[in-house]
Image (cartoon, rainbow, N blue to C red):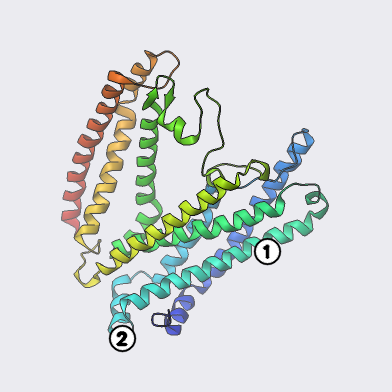
Amino acid sequence: MKKYLNKGLLYAWFNSAKAAIAIGLLVWGAVAYEIIKSNLNDVRNRLANNFDNYYYTNVCNEYFMLSIIFVAIYFIAKGINKRNTEMFLCSGPYTKKQIRYNEFICLLITLILFVITYIYIAIVSYFGNAEFISIMEGYWNIVIIETSKIILLGIIGIMFMLIIDLMFSNSVIGFISMISIIPASIFIVIVKVGSILVYFGVNKNYSLLDKIIGLDYNGKLRRGFFELVFDRISVKDIIIRNLWIETVIILFIIIIMIIVYSVVQNKYKLENANKIFSSQNNEKILLILVSTAAGSFASLFLTESFIHSLQRKNGNSMVLIGSDLIKGLGLDIICMLLIGFIAYKVIKRILKNIV
């Protein structure tokens, strides 16, 4: 650790990002306050309607603003002239590994500051609503869970930023891709996979998606995985076994991302990069991702009516099996491959003229 940790690099990074971090902490403090305030109001409404007095977890999209703040801080700290800055640092006493390692440490320290801010807001909210929270169930339990969630998902976000940044030689293009193109592409692909899982039948009334989310054969929803990330649940709904499994899975994802980051970093050579990408391999990876997203997006619309017609043959069931499954899935795959291939060629030609 001491081999790569450098006080000069840490100082330079925080000196560049100090204003952005200060503004980000203020914005995040306001956002965190509104999140907790909204949750407390939800409990009040449920109590008024004689439901329950449990404090619920947050959905992951409520932390979207935090991710935007982090990307902005990172972009400001890196500066616009990424190539010149890094070549200047590497020409001095610093190695590429030192620069990257210290960036990671700086982002972790920044994440800790945001976590402390969340805890501070939670404490302030407690003292401001102490009497009400005293009759509430699970406030501090959920605060601890949300704090852990911010830390773990924050580390995933940091690794995602660092990996994407390594794939681009242009800071502006990297920033735009980081907040729009790549997340949108991943989201579209996930949506498409989800739409396939909906009709991919295990039997005539049971799909792969039902199995994944924990729906039993009678249509009753069991407690599934990743509820703490994607759903609003209270302490009474938390299954300790699932909680530990989710934590292990998230830690495993972090380890995988660290490995990917190490591989990409070893192949990262800014001096051999073009105007946009840091290497041809990274260009191909991103082209495949965006093209797959384009094919997935097109198939969501082009094959929808045909698949729905197959589903209507089975009455109220959304599941396809046998020859209907082959037809629906086959059409989806062909559409994705065809549109994706066309998109790949078009984007590649456009990039060829640019870079």
Quarter the N terminus occupies: bottom left
Disc marking residue 92: 2
Front-most of residues 203 and 86: 203
Q: Position of residue 35 (x, y in %)?
A: 64, 51
Q: Which residue shows up at 78% across the image and 51% down it? A: 133
Where is residue 352? Give x, y as percent: 16, 55
Q: In which image quadrant can residue 323 be found?
A: top left
Crowd tier of the residue under label 2, counting other residues whose Cα lies within 10 Å: few below 14, some 14–19, many 20 or above: few
What residue is shown with label 1? 120
Q: How many marks?
A: 2
Label 1, label 2: how far apart the Cα atoms are: 41 Å
Residue at the (55%, 64%) spot, across then down: 24
Q: Position of residue 72 (x, y in %)?
A: 46, 62
* Amino acid type, residue under disc 1 in the picture: Tyr
Which of the two residues, 90 or 180, is positioned nearer the viewer here?
Answer: 90
Residue 258 percent location from the top left of the image: 38, 63
Q: Quadrant of residue 125?
A: bottom right
Residue at left offset 56%, top offset 46%: 241
Q: Residue furthest front?
A: 241
